[in-house]
Image (cartoon, rainbow, N blue to C red):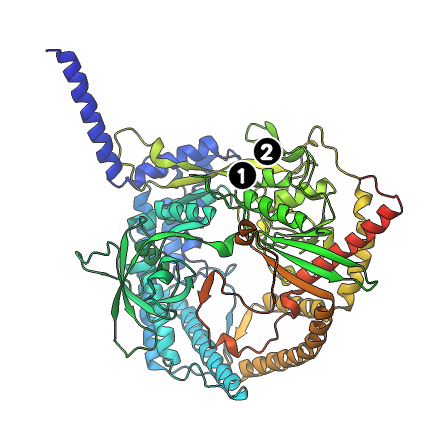
């Protein structure tokens, strides 16, 4: 018998069994913290001195837990600084940082429990005096920590008082609106304001105390450590990483329902995906309330009570493997109090079609009688399925663009508003749809090495007049695309004063794979680390600065601290050399000065942009003052003034919007174009953009929101989208005239 071979086989079996055991056990988060610390030092772009960051780790963790500075007191902060302020870096590397995280979180929990108990006491006593001249800071971001528990409780008393006053005034306003409109008050059977606020804090207590496990605490602490390097370096727990992947591929396995946590603890069904598992099964209805979940769906185990459970954990219970059942305990909408029913639904893949790229065609008749056909592509994110590669936004946009081209569009708007970015490869490929082959983005690593990423296509799919709409929420990949098109003088950028300003590239790294061979690695999580900065073909980084539009439109974000530059520990803006072989088109062929002139005239004459500028001024004043009155009469006067101004604005808009709608019906025709339409190959579908569509999801009605009599935008176009189309229309006209005059060489 070959004992050597037997011994080798036995050792292999032991190693395999040990490895499987290690994979099955939950990882030791002290070991995870150490490995993450090593990975940050070896991989992060900035190469920050890890040993000098202890105080930053602590400060960021405390701020994440208590951003409003109402739970911790100065005594807590002093103790944390003494014990951990200079030691967290070493503790991470020595595999004993979780003790510090748990100690800090335990103190936080104790303070939260005390605050919530005090909130319940105050609300039960109901002895608030709203005739006093008291006020509260709107933001305590820059305030000192409360010096002691007494001061903290006084700040807390004012916050509870403000919450109760706001809820009372909200109910009064809803009742008045309902009466004016001859409708039933939707809040007539609602709980008392005191009980409503108490339940709100009860949900908060569950979310930060009862519903938090060791993995959650570790995730919060390690996330604070990671983000101390820059705002986009982050630690993601296994649960968070699963959600991230689902979001990137616009697909998940579940029942196809939109959930919302109610203040009384239940989870409400706010939407049902058309054609999804819940829709096909048919028993679950809008406004139903889920109170318990059996994730295995077989009744073998007791159902999990989800009352006051964090909504993301409820989602995790309901999602699962494809073709497996999940059982829900439901209080039917409109049923008798306490009535419940059990509903079993088989999980399946659910495509989030609301989040996919889509298009529309706008036929525009000009004042001179010459018609223009304008295409609009809306891209919510740069999504991609990294695992199977079935879903790619660049493929979707390519299909839409080819169809728009077949429809004979004269110009194109690419709407990147609220697009927070996504897959770098997708934006590289997509840029080539609009430009000839050449540099799209330059990427620099921590060693200063620069790589130029080019578009692959020899020729563009679409080379006609083009406008890109952006706002302060357009970030990362959106900024790469907008920046490349601007540098190439290929499109006119229209929007807020700048885009977000995220000019960094992150790479997810599985921490479990980096742990020692025999260590448990289940639920070790992922480090999403900044490994590169990206630069435009011109050499300028978008970091902090963002992309500055060619035509800037007034926006409410002008009053708010929105953007990378306002985030903690953001990397600096810088420039590198221009990309080799970068040969932009001629700038003068975009006719930007003339487009600006025409747009400025419209914006100056626009009542809606005037309202935006007025709101910016008022918002800036409120932020500077940073105080909210807790006096009932003062608040009523403030609200009465706001109501009068809003009513005047609404009355003016209602009259004006009717006239705009009339003109739109004469000059504009709208056609919808979804990915399904492209696949089916049918004719363009005329549609009314003022009507809400439930093509992909049926949504529960919000009776309170329906009392808002603010008129909807004419033809469903907000001022920014309308002005973007007008700029494109101008560009089409000017380009036509220049081509006829022989002034264009392309």
Residue nearer the viewer, 434 or 669:
669
User: Quick one: SS at disc 2?
Assistant: strand
Q: Which image quarter: residue 611?
A: bottom right
x then y, percent, for residue 541: 64, 40
- Answer whether residue 139 is visible to the viewer in this image: yes
Residue highlighted by disc 2: 443
Res. 505 mark: 1
The residue drawn where x is 42% and y is 45% is 245
Residue 509 placement, left or right of 293: right
The residue drawn where x is 67% and y is 67% is 612
x then y, percent, for residue 255: 35, 57
Mark 2 to mark 1: distance in Å?
8 Å
Residue farthest right in this picture: 741
Residue 320 against residue 130 in the figure, above or below: above
* Circle 1 Cα neighbour tier, 10 Å, few/some/many (<14 / 14–19 / ≥20): many
Residue 544 against residue 132 in the figure, above or below: above
Q: Earlier in the sequence, mark 2 or mark 1?
A: 2
Residue 430 against residue 137 in the figure, above or below: above
* Circle 2 Cα neighbour tier, 10 Å, few/some/many (<14 / 14–19 / ≥20): many
x then y, percent, for residue 196: 37, 76
Residue 592 placement, left or right of 486: right
């Amino acid at each position: 018998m070959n004992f050597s071979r037997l011994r080798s086989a036995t050792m292999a079996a032991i190693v395999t069994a040990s490895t499987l055991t290690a994979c099955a056990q939950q990882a030791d988060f002290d070991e995870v913290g150490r490995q993450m610390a090593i990975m940050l030092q070896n991989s992060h772009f900035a190469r920050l001195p890890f040993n000098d960051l202890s105080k930053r780790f602590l400060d960021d963790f405390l701020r994440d837990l208590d951003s409003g500075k109402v739970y911790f007191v100065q005594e807590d902060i002093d103790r944390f600084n003494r014990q951990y302020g200079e030691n967290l870096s070493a503790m991470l590397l020595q595999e004993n940082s979780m003790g510090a995280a748990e100690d800090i979180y335990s103190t936080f929990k104790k303070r939260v429990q005390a605050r919530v108990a005090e909130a319940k006491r105050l609300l039960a006593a109901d002895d608030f005096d709203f005739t006093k001249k008291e006020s509260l800071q709107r933001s305590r971001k820059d305030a000192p920590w409360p010096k002691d528990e007494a001061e903290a409780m006084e700040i807390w008393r004012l916050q509870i008082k403000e919450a109760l006053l706001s809820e009372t005034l909200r109910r009064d306003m809803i009742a008045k609106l309902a009466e004016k409109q001859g409708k039933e008050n939707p809040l007539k059977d609602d709980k008392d304001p005191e009980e409503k606020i108490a339940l709100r804090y009860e949900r908060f207590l569950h979310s930060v105390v009862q519903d938090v496990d060791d993995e959650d605490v570790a995730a919060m602490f390690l996330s604070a450590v990671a983000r101390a390097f820059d705002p986009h370096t982050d630690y993601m727990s296994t649960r968070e990483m699963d959600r991230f992947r689902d979001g990137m591929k616009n697909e998940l396995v579940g029942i196809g329902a939109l959930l919302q946590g109610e203040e009384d603890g239940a989870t409400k069904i706010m939407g049902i995906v058309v054609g999804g598992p819940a829709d096909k099964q048919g028993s679950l209805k809008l406004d139903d309330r889920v109170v318990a979940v059996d994730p295995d769906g077989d009744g073998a185990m007791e159902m999990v009570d989800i009352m006051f459970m964090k909504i993301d954990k409820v989602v995790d219970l309901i999602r699962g493997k494809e073709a497996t059942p999940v059982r829900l305990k439901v209080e039917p909408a409109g049923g008798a109090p306490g009535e419940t029913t059990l509903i079993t639904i088989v999980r399946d893949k659910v495509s989030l079609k609301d989040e996919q790229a889509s298009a529309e065609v706008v036929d525009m008749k000009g004042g001179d009688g010459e018609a223009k056909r304008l295409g609009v592509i809306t891209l919510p994110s740069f999504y991609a399925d990294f695992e199977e590669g079935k879903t790619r936004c660049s493929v979707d946009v390519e299909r839409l663009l080819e169809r728009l081209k077949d429809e004979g569009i004269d110009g194109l708007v690419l709407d990147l508003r609220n697009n927070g970015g996504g897959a770098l490869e997708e934006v590289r490929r997509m840029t080539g749809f609009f430009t000839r082959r050449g540099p799209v983005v330059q990427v620099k690593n921590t060693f200063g090495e620069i790589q130029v990423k080019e578009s692959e296509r020899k020729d563009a799919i679409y080379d006609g007049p083009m406008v890109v709409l952006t706002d302060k929420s357009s970030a990362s990949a959106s900024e790469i695309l907008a920046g490349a098109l601007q540098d190439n003088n290929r499109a006119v950028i229209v929007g807020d004063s700048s885009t977000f300003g995220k000019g960094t590239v992150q790479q997810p790294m599985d921490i479990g794979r980096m742990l020692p061979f025999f260590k448990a690695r289940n639920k070790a999580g992922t480090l999403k680390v900044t490994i590169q900065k990206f630069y435009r073909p011109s050499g300028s980084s978008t970091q902090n600065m963002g992309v500055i539009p060619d035509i800037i439109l007034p926006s409410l974000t002008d009053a708010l601290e929105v953007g990378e530059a306002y985030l903690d520990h953001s990397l600096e803006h810088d420039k590198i050399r221009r990309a080799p072989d970068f040969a932009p088109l001629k700038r003068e062929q975009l006719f930007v000065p003339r487009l600006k002139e025409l747009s400025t005239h419209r914006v100056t004459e626009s009542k809606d942009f005037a309202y935006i500028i007025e709101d910016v001024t008022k918002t800036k004043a409120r932020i500077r003052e940073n105080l909210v009155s807790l006096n009932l009469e003062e608040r009523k006067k403030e609200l009465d003034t706001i109501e009068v101004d809003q009513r005047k604005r609404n009355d003016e808009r209602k009259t004006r919007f009717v006239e705009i709608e009339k003109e739109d019906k004469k000059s504009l025709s709208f056609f919808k174009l979804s990915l399904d339409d492209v696949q089916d190959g049918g004719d363009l579908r005329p549609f009314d953009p003022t009507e809400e569509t439930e093509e992909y999801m049926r949504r529960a009605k919000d009776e309170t929101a329906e009392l808002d009599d603010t008129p909807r935008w004419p033809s469903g176009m907000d001022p920014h989208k309308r002005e973007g189309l007008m700029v494109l229309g101008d560009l089409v006209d000017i380009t036509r005239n220049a081509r006829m005059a022989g002034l264009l060489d392309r």
